[in-house]
Amino acid sequence: MDKVKILGISGSSRKGSFNSALLRAAADLLPERAGLEVADVSGLPLFNQDRESDPPEEVKRLKQQIRESDAILFATPEYNYSTSALLKNAIEWANRPSSDNAWDGKPAAIMSASTAARGGARAQLHLRQIMVDLNMFPINRPQVYVANAREAFDSELRLVDERYRATLKGLLAALVEWADRLKARQAEIPLNA
Ligand SMILES: Cc1cc2nc3c(=O)[nH]c(=O)nc-3n(C[C@H](O)[C@H](O)[C@H](O)COP(=O)(O)O)c2cc1C
């Protein structure tokens, strides 16, 4: 079977970001037949609809990375009960123009880490709502909300909490299985048929 190509995107550009660290932990916990590439969206300019038909090179590259992947793995911080502007900005660029939505039909998983007790649960819900418009297909379970992130990661930003490691491993296995199922189905019935 072909390797399942997962594209990871962190919604934080902070040097010590727990969400970017969560993506690094995911790279360690992948099923053998999956690979993870991480797209850096921290340098994208702010979305401007005047440029959607002829976007900057880094946006074209991002859209190509999305198209070449079999599944998307979002790691979102929670800012003011929502996802971050950084992630939303990347989402907007790759969603436009509407005839060229790179997210269309992609299987996906969401995870989040927060220094607070809710672990980013509200950001995940907002992101799910956005994904309806993108026509993405996120899995529902297991849910990876890393709460009190300062305790779940060590000083080198390694995910050390075994319960979260186990749940994250389950999320990745479920994502790979979901990507396989959608791909097989899509071969039978194309999404835009
Ligand atoms: C502008 C701002 C708003 C935040 N709002 C929330 C919030 O609504 N809920 C929450 O759990 N944490 C909130 N936090 C704390 C973040 O979850 C925490 O800073 C987290 O570490 C950010 O992710 P990162 O480590 O990947 O950068 C907020 C932080 C910032 C800077």
Image (spheres, rainbow, N blue to C red):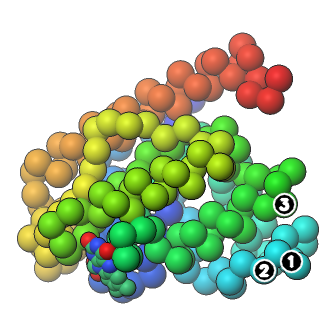
Quick one: label 1, few (<14), some, or many (20+) residues within 10 Å? Answer: few
> On the picture, is 107 further left or further right than 94?
left
Residue that label 1 marks: 51
For residue 193, what is the image quadrant? top right
Determine the secondary structure under disc 3: loop
Quadrant of res 27 = bottom left
Instruction: Residue 37: give x, y in percent of width and height.
Output: 52, 57
According to the picture, the residue beneath numbered tag 2 turns out to be: 48
* Residue at screen point 86% across, 51% down: 99
Label placed on residue 97: 3
Please say whether residue 73 is visible from this viewpoint.
no
Query: Which residue: 15% across, 66% down?
Result: 117
At x 68% / y 66%, what residue is drawn? 92
How packed mark 2 is, by other alpha carbons closer than 10 Å (few <14, some 14-19, many 20 or more), is: few
Marks 3 and 2, how far apart at CA: 11 Å
Say which amino acid is labelled 3. Answer: Pro
| SS of the residue under disc 2 | loop
Left or right of residue 74, residue 21 in this image:
left
Contact, mark 3 vs mark 2 (Cβ under 8 Å): no
Judging depth in this view, the residue of 36 and 189 nearest the camera is 189
Ligand 1 resides in the quarter of the picture at bottom left
Tell me residue 29's x, y (percent). Answer: 29, 47
Q: Does the image show residue 53? A: yes
Q: Looking at the rendering, which quadrant does residue 77 occupy?
A: bottom left
The amino acid type found where label 1 is placed reads: Arg
Q: Marks 2 and 1, how far apart in space?
A: 6 Å
**Image location (x, y in percent) of residue 119:** 23, 63
The residue shown at (14%, 79%) is 155
Q: Do the numbered discs 2 and 1 sit on residues whose CB atoms are within 8 Å?
A: yes
Residue 35 badge: none
Label 1 sits on a secondary structure element that is helix
Q: Which amino acid does label 2 sit on?
A: Asn
